[in-house]
Amino acid sequence: MDDHHTTDGGRGQAPPEIPDFDLIRPIGEGGFGQVWLAVNRATERLRAVKVIPLQFSGTRDRAGREINSLVRLEDNLKYKHPNLLAIHHVAKTDEFLYYVMDLADDVSGAPATDEPGYRPASLSSRLQGGPLPAEECLRIARQLLAGLASLHEARMVHRDVKPANCLFVGGQLKLGDFGLLVEASPQVSRVGTAKYMPPDGRMDARADVYAAGLVIYEMITGLPADRFPSCGRRASQVIEDPTLQLLHRLVMRACEPDPGDRFSDVRVMLAELETGRSVRRPVARRTRRAWLLATAAAACAILLLGFWIGRPRTVHVNFVTEPFEATVYLDGDLQKDADGNPRRTPCTIAELAPRVHHVEFRLPGRTPLDAGPCDFAESRRVEKRWPAGP
């Protein structure tokens, strides 16, 4: 769900009737509603207005879920944080829930306008130009972590941290889209954007840590999240630049497959960034070794080489299915974790040989789902969906 990032959807549709605002055109699409470019009739100030239908299909009360998240945000935050998107007003009509937010800058960096060419500035749009300069990476990482840390301080988790939900208002990053916000708990439901979800699937504070790590990874490498941990062509710069080194060490710990090896929450992650020192030295040694492995090959402009002493070349591969909780079979063998438990999607499996493997997913009550031969030298992600029905 992406709070006001550009969409071409909705052209020609009649805008909803919202008190005090004229809705100009849709500028964003989310899982629970649409974001519109709007103007206040009294002040003539441009705003973003998110509109969610009160009449819903299926079993999900989308407006109710959004209201609950906004109430949590208002009840728990002691003050408005400069790196969280400001929500100015929440209300209902007979047909819609709507709320009024700050409007993002234009992608050009200029202030927002109501001109047809206006496109909201998000981190995802900025990353379309490739990796960001080191100092810009550091500045934006600090702002992202500061906004998230304020949520964790209030014992809330965001659950949908990604570049499309990072907007720029007055040149400053604002984390938006609070539709999945919940109180921090180990039992929070497994929802979010699959690409940014941790392998263990637990959507708690450490899941926000994992997602924030991947967002910073995208900034420093210019690669999509599913290429982690490869540094691609920017490896030599990461090795030479102290700022990029610091950020990469932060990313490697934030994205540890074992949640116990990650930062406990984003407040700790932010403190680590500010001090530039490792709080847990055993993890730091593993992180540095992983970083050297992840960056060595890119100096030759080839894919990541994961050489461990006495072991062959290996890669990390992400496995995702819909529905979740499918077991993973490679070349006919059930994949298990270090404790002997079956790996269940979504998950990341490390130390796989970068060659063609036959992949199959199995889910109780469903016919096995054959993903066929997959070349892990070319792709680090296998994603499949069961057809509708049993």
Image (tube, rainbow, N blue to C red):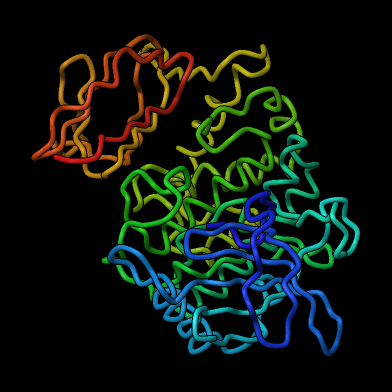
Image vertical order of residue 212 relative to residue 92, above or below: above
Left or right: residue 336 compared with residue 244: left
The picture quadrant where one finds residue 133 is: top right
Residue 245 in the image, given as x and y percentages of width and height: 67, 40
- In depth, the one of 308 and 357 nearer the eye is 357
Residue 219 picture location, percent across and down: 68, 43
Q: Nearer the viewer, residue 45 or 150?
A: 45
Image quarter hosting the C terminus: top left
- Residue 120, relative to residue 249: is it above or below? below
Residue at 67% from the left image edge and 84% from the top image edge: 88
Check the image and name the residue furthest to the right.
110
Residue 114: x %, y % from top left:
85, 65
Q: As displayed, is residue 93 above or below residue 149?
A: below
Could you tell whether 202 is left or right of 240 in the image?
Answer: left
Q: Residue at x 58, y 57 (%)?
A: 29
Which of 249 and 88 lies nearest the eye of the viewer?
A: 88
Quarter of the image for residue 361 reads top left
In the image, residue 34 sits, relative to residue 77, either above or below, namely above
Residue 26 locus on image (x, y percent): 68, 61
The mark tally for this picture is 0
Q: What residue appears at the point 42 percent right and 44 percent down from the top-left corner? A: 256
Q: Residue at x 56, y 27 (%)?
A: 230
In the displayed structure, does residue 284 sit left or right of residue 163?
left
